[in-house]
Image (tube, rainbow, N blue to C red):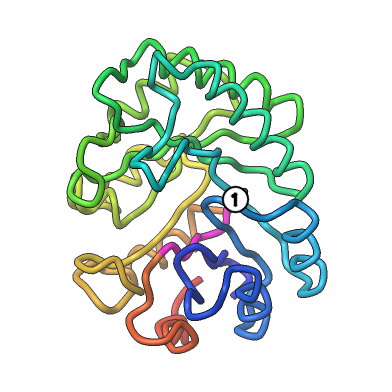
Amino acid sequence: MNNYSVNLSTVFTEVPFLDRFKKAREAGFVYVECQFPYVYTIEEVRNELENNNLSMVLINLPAGHWEDGDRGLAADPSRIKEFRKSVERGICYANGLGVKKIHCMAGIHPDNNWEVFVENLFYAGTAMSKHGITLLIEPINPFDMPGYFLSDLKQAAGIIQLVGLPNVKLQFDFYHIERIHGHSLSVYQKYAEMVSHVQIADHPGRQQPGTGEINYTEILQYLSKHYRGLIGLEYNPQGRSEGSFAWMKGVTP
């Protein structure tokens, strides 16, 4: 399991968040990731990492008021100051937890625009570069998140080129790309040089590989030869979380 990072925001949800670290270790994982650790102090999360000999590899920037419908701040022209504060907070948590990759969500506000998105990503990427942190953006499919500002991989690649910073990269979620574009492995191959983190879930259902239509045998075999990063398990387990890893047996990587 050393090639995988289990997402504690979607897996082991049978128990409270801070108890999921122990569950991950008991299941054999070395690496974990999560979406928003900010409800907890850095010390609380770091203690769970240390007590369970785990490394946190990825978090999201604060995305605004999630419970009120926010899904990111980066493209909203009315919340630039708030976004910059979120960058500071994200860097603080990343440094405190040893995290080297941060995903930045674009948002769903109707006034979002590309110019603000590019400027904010340049600001965030520049700030994170001083700490050795990679900034990630990810297209999210419009079926699961209607109105999300970034829902096309070609656009995401174009944005990264406009930002022009070496530490601004793609987060490639095979589930989202399959829903947006189809033929997710072929799409990955086209944009692989821009990808810094991969996540997986099956389609339909966003559950573990083997529950849907995506050919993860082929995908994982390809990644084992051509991708050197960790593979994030950001799926909603079918059944109990502990039983959702059976697909790993005999599967590359």
Of residue 124 and residue 163, the one placed in the foreground of this image is 124
Residue at (31% x, 16% y) in the render? 113
Tell me if 129 is positioned left or right of 240 in this view.
right
Label 1 is placed on what type of residue? Leu
Of residue 127 and residue 46, the one placed in the foreground of this image is 46
Figure quadrant of residue 153: top left
Tell me if 205 is positioned left or right of 156 in this view.
left
| Residue tagged 1 | 58
Residue at (52% x, 52% y) in the render? 35
> Magenta span covers which residues?
229-234
Considering only vertical position in the picture, is 134 above or below 250?
above
Q: Is residue 143 in view from this perspective?
A: yes
Of residue 160 and residue 44, the one placed in the foreground of this image is 44
Figure quadrant of residue 191: top left
Examine the structure image and report whether residue 231 is included in the region drawn in magenta: yes
Q: Where is residue 245 drawn, in percent x and y?
A: 46, 82
Farthest-out residue, front: 68
The image quadrant where one finds the N terminus is bottom right
Tell me if 2 is positioned left or right of 11 in this view.
right
Residue at (56% x, 33% y) in the render? 135
Q: Residues within 10 Å of mark 1 (few under 14, many from 20)?
A: many
Of residue 132 and residue 14, the one placed in the foreground of this image is 14
Q: Where is residue 137 drawn, in percent x and y?
A: 44, 35
Residue at (45% x, 43% y) in the render? 171
Considering only vertical position in the picture, is 30 above or below 25?
above
Secondary structure of the residue carrying tag 1 is strand
Considering only vertical position in the picture, is 160 above or below 247?
above
